[in-house]
Amino acid sequence: MLAHEHEAAGWFLEHAWLIPVIPAVAFAIIIGFGKKLPMKGSEIGIASMLASLVLAVGTTWQWIQRVDAVHGSEGEGALARGVFGFARGLVPRAAEGGEPYVEPVIRSWTWWQSGGIEFGLGQHIDGLAVMLLLLVTFISTLVQVFSLEYVRGDRRYTHFFASLTLFSAGMLAMVLAENTVQLILGWEIMGLCSFMLIGHWWEEQANSRAALKAFFTVRVGDMGLLVGVAILFGAFGTFSIQETSRIAMDPATSQTVLLWAAVALFIACIGKSGQFPLHTWLPDAMAGPTPVSSLLHSSTMVVAGVFLVARLYPVFYNGFDIAQNGNSANLIAIIGGITIVIAAGLAFVQNDIKKVLAYSTVSQLGYMMMGLGVGAWTPAVFHIFTHAFFKCCLFLCAGSISHTASHHSFDMKKDMGGLLRRMPITAGAWMVSTLALCGVPFFSGFFSKDEIIDNADHNGYKVFFIVGLIGAFMTTAYMTRATYLTFFGKPRGAAAGEHHHDEAHAEEHELGLATVGHDEPADHTSHHEHEAHAAHGAHDAHGAHDDHASHGKPAFGIVGESPILLVFPLIVLGFLAVVSGYINAAPFHIEKFLEWVEPRASEFAPAIDHATFSWAKAMPSIVLVALGFVFSLLICKAVFGEADSKLKGLTQRSKVLGAGHRFLVNKYYLDDLYEKVIVHGVAHPIAQAAYWINQNVLDGIVNAFGKGGRRTGEWVYKYVDQGAIDGLAVNGSGKAARGTGGALRPLQSGKVNQYGALLFGAAAIGALVLVIVNI
Amino acid sequence: MLINNFLLLGAVLFCIGVYGVIARKNAVMVLMSIELILNSVNINLLAFSQLHDNVDGNTFALYIIAVAAAEVGVGLAMVLLIYRNRKSISLDELSEMKG
Amino acid sequence: MIASLLAAAGDFVAPVADYHALAPEIVLAAGICLVLLVDLFVEERQRWITSTLAGFVLLGAFIPVVTLAVIGGDVRNGLGGDVLDGRYVIDEYALILKALFLIAGYVVVLMSSDEIESGRYHQGEYYVLLLTSVLGMVMMASSRDLISIFVALEFLSIPAYMLAAWNKRNSKGNEAGMKYYLLGVFASAIMLYGMSLLYGVTGTTLLSEIGPAITANGQFSGIEALAVVFIVVGFAFKVSAVPFHQWAPDVYEGAPTPITAFLSVASKAAGFVALTTLVFLAFPLASDVYQPFIWVLSAASMTVGNLLALRQTNIVRMLAYSSISQGGFILMPLTVAGEAGVGESALKAVVVYLVVYAATNLGAFAVVIAVAKKTRSGDISSFGGLFSYAPALGVLMTVFLASLAGIPPLGGWFAKFGAFKAVLDAGTNWGYSIAIIAALNTVIAAAYYITVMREIWMKPVPDGDVTPIRTPSSIQAALVITCGATIVLGVLPDLVGRFGDLSDLTGALGR
Amino acid sequence: MDVISDQNWLLSLGTFLPLAGVLVMLLIPKREELLHKQVALVTALGTLGVGIYTLTQFDYDKAEQLQFYANTEWISVIKSGYTIGLDGISLPLYFLSMVITVLVMIYSWDHIPSPGNPKAFLILMLVLQTGMAGTFIAQDLILFFVFFEVVLLPMYFMIGVWGGEQRQYASLKFFLYTMFGSALMLVAFLALFYQTDSVSFSIPYLIEQGINIDEDVAVWIFAGMFIGFAVKVPMFPFHTWLPDAHTQAPTQGSVILAAILLKLGTYGFVRIAIPILPQAAVKWAPVIGVLAVIGIIYGALGCLAQKDMKRLIAFSSVAHMGFVMLGISTLTATGINAAMFGMVAHGLITGMLFFCAGSIKERYHTLEISRLSGLLIQMPKLGWILGFCAMASLGLPGLAGFWGEFPAILSAYNPAPALSEPLFRVLMVIAALGTVLAAAYLLWLYQRTAFGEPNPEFTGHGHAHAVGAAGNDEHHDDIHDVNVFEWIAWTPLLIAIVVFGVYPQLMFKVMDPAVTQLVEVFNK
């Protein structure tokens, strides 16, 4: 289709379809002979990712040229501006609306046809696709580099890279999908890979269960995808995304069909993007190796759902008519909003650093969804962009810490603390990313998240404006807590070089720091998780050993910075966490992202109008962020702060020294006060309640779906199948037959006279009847 | 003269015969009852033969007489056989095989 | 009265009979005498001569049947139609059945020879009786007159009574003979009463004349109905149709196994032949009477036979009941024989079924005999693990049982198929209902045939004795013939399909 | 339907060649086991050769026409002829049956199930092959019926003699069920024959005439065929023979059963019931659709209840055939194409799963899910293959299974004009739910058996509490990874699963023309 486009587009645009093909081929190669290669196949993976990255960059460059060509602004150096948007940013924003729609570069080849229906494969390259292509290839490359070190010596090293590569292939295939079927294809391949990667250390029950849960939960959503695609095809008669969009935009199209399709598709997004109430698989998925978490659960797989909404935006836009009913709500926004708050609350009570990040991811995805829900298409997509960098960075930091400092434990309470000095680079990267995540001004997160909140207000979704603000507050709170626990205070547990954690426990108990997360459900899970990590720690223990050796460090004890392979990605990502925002920094009227990515209003895309930025409007969120920081910091200081160590010493001496005892006791009361009143009294119950609901209700539902399924299955099988159908109908009839047979036997008495009697009797009766009948 | 008398006689004989077959426990008696039936048949045939004025009936009757004789011969032989084995010709005891 | 007789006897001219046409009967009759004579002179050691001779007699009688079939045409005219005027007819229908009876007889001889030689029997008389009975059947195939049918019937029955009681010392044997005899005679007496009435109503014994004569006076009289029913009863007894079947299981169990085979195949077939002839020639106008009656018989036979067979533990008894239900299937086409345009397929169905059934059932009995030689037991369980130590016999038995169950590509399927086809051809509710009943019965039937197969293939050998079975050559021959016939008929049913041409049969009557 | 009748000997050769092998083997004494295996394999390979030649000779541009058409006198009494032909619908299944037979032969090389006796076992298999191939080429109802029944006894004995513990019950059930079905089917055929003025049983002729049958009658005739085929498929509620048969059958039996025998039923619908009686098909489609969907959910629930791996796979067949039937019931080209594809895909995938189950059983002497675990550690290759098949079976795009399920769901949104849209859309949603359940039980199975540490009972340490068919010492000794015969037998299947998953056009382009022609009648 659209053949005339082809001359216009450049080579890279024409051949963007190669981007997913390369990793796919690489996957085959790795599976085939990965084991025989010097680096066990990892080099193939990285090479393929680099190749794709190059292509992606080329594509981006040409796309930008294309856009500029259409929009009249000059094209040279566009790439530069593409990446470092702030370089020559202060270009006045292009005139509203007037810009023509930039034709995406679409190519498709018939894959197979059945009964007149054509199933095609192809590429649909527009701003969104380009952006994600760049993003995915970039992140994947970094993560693979990181993994080189992180999973070295693992027993399934090759498989790991194979899966990573295939995963990227799937994601890329989905991103540039020309039609919905191809989209499903990539979508499902990702699901499979997530299963393999999360369950990478499947020797441990918990991990395999997590993998199962992840795949299954996502699969529940996929049902919606299948139905949705079927509806769209059935109603529109095409799989092509562009066609679908066009028809969806066509006012003549029935709104009910769109609504149904949108609902069905959105269910899929809920599953994939870990939206409430199907978000529970995401934290469990942290059972996977950290690079997996950073790739799948921060920047690629989980945004697939968001991508789907953004990709088929017209369907949702008109399905839920987002534009029309102003300050009311719609499904996407509601789900998004709920997710933000719930997840943020949960993040506050986690002890496992990765779980904090997991919940934070869920919450950020909530932002994106909400953004799309309130019609802030561009900010939401932009948030995907920025979020990818800093969240990936955060995960990798966590990985680097656990790998180097805390001996494969992720428990902030037990095994971390005081790492600021020991791991300056990691800490730095972490800080920057955290600031970005919290949406502190001049960091990337600010430009995207604040835009979302702003537009929510602007489009009249007041409620969600508030929700957004609350979210911002909570985000800062939990991130501050995590940061504090990890990098400040005194080293604990493994970070302090201890192998076993009894002392950590003892210490805390002595201090009466029965802190958040140590109550039942939380403790239960954190303990549980801990086993998991301990287990995989054991598995690649030798790996850990030799890399420690190779860097001439003692296996445990006072640790330094991680090896370069781990740190390098952190630096890059940390840097981007700061600057990536400036592509579209509203405060400075840089709106390149908007220009390059956002489809202009046309028959293919709805008109999206944007709130104009003003510091005044940004103030509330900034203030709340600050508040969150302060509030959280106070608690942390109080609960986990320096005081503790002094306190410890003093309490020991308190046995002999009476003096100052009361004071200390009072001090201790103070801690007690903070602890009991503030944490337990205010923050804790809410959070715990949320967590309880999460674990028992929502998660319960998810599991119950499985369990209940099993039970119903057993019941049906036992009673209906074996009992009724088989028992009565089948075997029953058999018995009946034999029974009648038995009943008939007495007739065969063996007595001649009776035989004779019957013989004549039958004859007589027959004769009688027939005579009567026939006369 | 009326054919009905003959037919009536035949019918009566037939019924007696049938009754005998069903009621009698003694093999020989049953045999004789059967002979009664055959004779009732003969009477019918002869009567009808007369009615239709052709020889078919007579011929048939002759055949039946001959065959009946043969049958009785076989039958008595068999009764003897049983008597030799069981010292009894009561049919009720002939119910070894059943079901 | 005497005068009238003399008048009827009138001027006597010796019939000019066509001896070629009568050759089978003549050969048999001569053979019987021959066997009797020979038996007097051979001494114990050479008893095999008798059996062999009997076999050759049957084959000898088979030759003219073939030649007659080959010359084809209407040999019945050559038979001086004006003398016997269609009371005794040789047409293709008759020929295929004569052939059937002769071959069946021959197979029975093969099956018997070994068992009879094994002492304690007067085999001379045995074969004489057997041949006589076969002769009766061969006559039955040609009979087209009440008298000749009756004579043929007694001809084949009386020797059968004696054969059934052949185990003189065995009380079961006596019992079998006695029951068979008494009930048989009783049944034929009833039949005769019916015939006498029929003669009374129509004034003739020639079937082709009875046919039109029924309801000649427009109204269908009760007497006619009574007569038809009684006659049908007589043959229903012969084919052991429920509820006239009770003699069958007892007799089959008591009689020597080859005789059981003979009774369950040949004499049953003879009964069907007579029934068919009557239905098509004598009762075409009485279809309102015989169709419902036969419908009931057929349905009852297949159902009751099957249900009872399910419960049997004795293989012979099981086969007896199975043959009852098979009889029900053979009766099935006759329940619609009177419908317009159905006669053709109905007749074909019956003929084909008889042929296939004969081959299959004889085969099954042959295997039973062969196995019983080793196990000396009639229990189904005695077949346990047969396949493991006698694979050939196991497979053969499987083939026969599968054919009985009607599984393609073995003969049985086409027989059943023909029956179904015929009744559905009628398109009447009677036809459809019987078809459904039959369909259900095929499943029940499969159940007990399969249990035997299960014994053969899947169960352990009961007494662990796995010495292979030495099958006498005669029985091997029997098996080859029957098995071959079963399979060939299943794959190429056309071989027999073309026989039993209705026009040919009724054509004899110039109708 | 016009026909191409050059090389009309080809199909007969391909169909009856195995019987030649049978005759040879009958003459070879029982103890020459190796010789038997060789003869059987050679025969199967020869047959496959003929099949491949057929593939090369098939004119794919005229896939909607019957090719290699032969029509000779057979049973003139009932006007039934030996009519055979091959078109796009039957070709894939015809060829699949040959491939599967060969693979099963190879697998049998060192997997003759107890109580041994390869002679009988292989002979039965060859007879089966003839029956299956014949069913797919038959273009005459009677011929079809005969072949349809020919497979019955061999399979009965295969299950009953070489099967598991309850083999006798299972085999009997299988046999009686099918007997019942085919009896009614036969009645239906005959009724069909008479309703079309008793001229011929040839399917092409009946397709021309069947449309004229009065609708009420047609519905009843269809009912007869429906039961006959539904039992074979098997559709809920006629499915209960399947789990038993599958579970008890020897591996080879299960594979053939799953790969080919079940297809006879669905093929019957596509080849006979629907084209001959379109008017009745329209009436029955909703019933079929509903039963199919019930089957999908029901089979899935059944799977979730299973403790035994093989039985679970068996129940999954019910679910998958449910998808096939759903596709058929839409009476659209897409749906029926999907169904045809689903048949083959299910044949490959489930067949493969049964192979795996068989090999696991052979090594562990049990298939209790609760006792198996850590296959990936003890037998990595087998473990991965199992996982691969599980993924394929739960309909992962890119593997064959998906192209059977997804288009079926797709087609249910827009069924044939005559059918009720709301009903089928509801069915579509429920069917989609079925895919979720499929994921549930397959992954559950995989996670339980393949992941985790091996059960100590089988690692050689835990002999004290090791229970199982064989003595404790065998347990860890005979746990070896995929051996060479298994590789040879499995690789083609695995490759096919991927190839058809990546390039489904391979099969669709063969079937599409025929199917399109088939459903034309429903589009007006």
Image: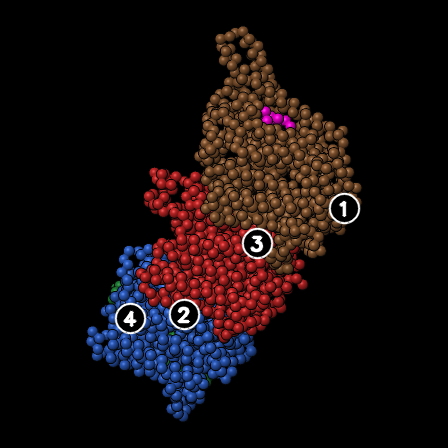
Disc 2 and disc 4 on one polypeptide chain: yes
Q: Colour of chain B?
A: green
Q: State whether residue D238 is above or below residue A419.
A: below
Check disc 2 and give the amino acid type: Ile
Q: Chain of mark 4?
A: C
How far is the residue under mark 2 from the one under mark 4? 21 Å
Q: Residues within 10 Å of mark 3 (few under 14, many from 20)?
A: many
Residue drawn at the location 28% of the way across and 69% of the way down:
C472
Furthest residue in direction front, as rendered: A76
Label 2 belongs to which residue?
A: C487
What amino acid is at disc 3?
Trp
- Amino acid type shown at disc 1: Gly
Is disc 4 in the same subunit as disc 3?
Answer: no
Residue C473, label in figure: 4
Mark 2 is surrounded, within 10 Å at the Cα level, by few (under 14), some (14 to 19) or many (20 or more) other residues, namely many
Q: Colour of chain A?
A: brown
- Picture residue at 67% right of the left edge, 48% below the top: A125
Location of residue D260 in the rendering, given as x and y in whole percent from the top left corner: 48, 59
Residue for badge 1: A72
Q: Is residue D460 above or below residue A680?
A: below
Q: Residue A334: image x %, image y %?
A: 68, 37
| Residue A332 within the magenta-colored segment of the rendering | no
